[in-house]
Amino acid sequence: MKANVCFGIVVAAAVVFAGNVYSFCGFYVAKADAKLFNKASRVVLVRDEDRTVLTMVNDYQGDPKAFAVVIPVPTVLERGQIHVGDQAIVDHLDAYTAPRLVEYFDDDPCKPVAVYEAMKSMARADASSVGPRRSAALGVTVEAEYTVGEYDIAILSATESDGLQTWLTESGYKIPAGAGAILQSYIRQGLRFFVARVNLDQQSRLGFTFLRPLQIAYESPRFMLPIRLGTINASGPQDLLVYALSRKGRIETTNYRTVKLPTGMDLPVYVKGDFADFYRDMFAYQVKKEDMRVVFLEYAWDMNWCDPCAADPLTPRELRDLGVFWLDDPRDRPGARKTTRGGQAQDVFVTRLHVRYDAETFPEDLVFQETGDRTNFQGRYVIRHPWTGDTNCDRGRTYRRDLRDRQEQEARQLANLTGWDIGTIRERMNLEAPRDDGGGSWWDQLWND
Amino acid sequence: MPAIPRYDPRIYQIFVLAILVIFGATFLSFDINAVNAAVILAVAAAVQLACSRIVCLGRYDLRSPLISGLSLIVLLRTNTWWLAACTAAVTIVSKFALRHNGKHIFNPTNFGLVFMMVVSDRVWVSPGQWGSAVLYVFFVACVGSFVVNRAARSDVTLAFLGSYAAILIIRALRLGDPMTIPFHQLQNGALLVFSFFMISDPKTTPDSRIGRIVFAFLVAVGAVWIQFGLYRINGFLWALAACAPLVPLLNRLFPGTTYQWRRPTC
């Protein structure tokens, strides 16, 4: 059976996750994690100077026999540069960096106002094989072959894409039509190919029912992610989530615009139950507004803390497992704490980038640079529950009047962010349309389309 | 005698750069920090004044530091105001301190950026932060500078952009890449600022036309090599700084007449 080569890594079912974690700065109520997006590839990119550790998450759900991956890499990788990681840590990183919804409750407007300073939350935070002679005839050199965990891995270099395609096909890989030109470009750029598929014997021996993430470490000035191969047989735009862990500051793309997602908006309270729909539609609407030509920044934060926390910051051990090589291995230190809470300051800055792309709008591979920017940024959306008690006082009456304006503002904000129909939003909020409709124009309601 | 344009082209450059700064900060979400912008302009003007007093016996022209300052605001990124101040100071001082035969060697903005990126990892240039729509508008505004510039040195800009585009297209053909790739690589606002406001600086380019064309070609080759051979970002900034010391040699090989602004300044 031929393995379908998977150039992107697929995330299946969309599941809404909601947890409850307390924070001083609003109550964290929900997050929009990677599971919201079908077909999202997830990559953790650890980078300092010219050293890179790449973790590729694999949520492939089909028959393991049919799974294979081909990734262009800048250097030949030795056995020690390849590792099989723990998906739970990537899921933790995803949860920690996910866009979040927080909620506040309005105070009793009739109660005397107490002046206090808000405290800041600091959560310290079956395949055939091609013989050497045949390989040489095809211009393909098998630089190395390893079995790592449940994967059989080969590092290939090639002189011509035709030979490489033939080699892959004869080795049981099913290469999509149109891959030749891109493989040829990578060959001429001097890249090697990391080819992996599942070793079923190893998988049953190890007892894993899912495919664990593959990790590779290499040293190269190239700070890029190859995305072109993944666009060949894609049925539509694909999502890629990059979680970059760096030392100096935020990571950005240098050949595409990196744009911050709209954040900090007050939204209608009913969004609490629809946060997943809200975030999916908001992201899709923003992608459309930017003509699907930008990379969105969803999170940029010092790994020592968070506010509010969608999940605890990663522990030094988890970071080390993801490849943050400049941290001391906490396992080497006797009595080392398990979490960062109250522990050593971590020299790690995390950037979460989310890109929706296709071959037309993203013709080139993504190229990155590390900036010196350590400004914190998060996708954070706010709901404010109105006071439902007695408002029978002067300030209470003012509060009721202001509340109506505030809710109208929230409805408009939601419509602007998602492109949802303002009438439906008002309906769900039990809000009447304003008679003079404030900033709207007389023609807004004319054709209703 | 070199042809002197009727209008000082620097006025037009200041106008275009100022519009770009305002538009970029307002509509393109450029990370232009108001404090940094004010600090850069103030320090550039003050250092120019101090250096003019010392070197030129009091002749002072605000246009030159304004162009340098506005170019820095468009290109320089830092979250630290004093690093912005240092960059502005280094930019202007380089003009007075690093001279050969009465001309400064490096384009001041180019030197300021490259120097600060070498000494500090808190200073960077973001070449990807431009939308393609604004690029076309900006490109037209830049081309407008040719009209104002008239006989001044547009040849170096055209030679650089032509060489750079040709090398990228040849590279794509060699790799078998679609043409969308080199065209996408050329849609870069920082490249336009560089081509129209930096490499075109008449004071730091060779005196003869042939010298300028050779110079522009060398910078283009260097930029592509740094970008796609060494895999470093902002190849053109590094290439211009590396090629600037070759200008005296090019002037010796291909002699010409030194450019003078409409009103001579330091």
Image (tube, rainbow, N blue to C red):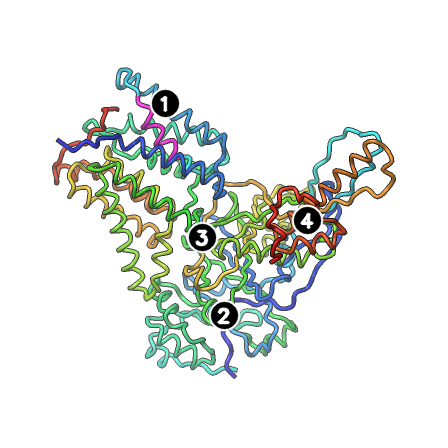
Question: Disc 4 or 2, which lies upstream in sequence?
Answer: 2
Q: Marks 4 and 2, how far apart in space? A: 36 Å
Q: Is residue B50 above or below residue B223?
A: above
For numbered disc 4, what is the local secondary structure? helix
Instruction: Give the magenta part as a residue range.
Output: B61-72
Q: Residues within 10 Å of mark 2 (few under 14, many from 20)?
A: some
**Crowding near the residue tagged with mark 3, few <14, some 14–19, many ≥20 C-alpha atoms within 10 Å:** many
Q: Position of residue B178 (x, y in %)?
A: 35, 64
Kindly report the secondary structure that dominates the magenta region of the rendered protein. Answer: helix
Residue B47, numbered label:
1
Q: Amino acid at mark 4?
A: Ala
Same chain for mark 4 and mark 1? The answer is: no
Residue lying at 64% horizontally and 47% vertically, measured from the top left? A413
Cα distance between the residues tagged 3 and 1: 36 Å
Tell me if label 4 and label 3 are in contact, CB under 8 Å: no
Q: Which of labels 4 and 2 is toward the front?
A: 4
Q: Are marks 2 and 3 in contact (CB under 8 Å)?
A: no
Q: Nearer the viewer, mark 3 or mark 1?
A: 3
Q: Which residue is mark 2?
A: A234
Q: Chain of mark 2?
A: A
Subunit bearing disc 1 = B
Q: Which x, y percent locates residue B161?
A: 27, 48
Distance between mark 2 and mark 3 Cα atoms: 21 Å
Residue hosting label 4:
A411
Residue A336 visible at all: no
Q: Which residue is mark 3?
A: A256
* Pointers 4 and 1 in contact (C-beta within 8 Å): no
Q: Is residue B231 magenta?
A: no
Q: Left or right: where does residue B15 sit relative to residue B38?
A: left
Answer above or below: position of B266 versus A135: above
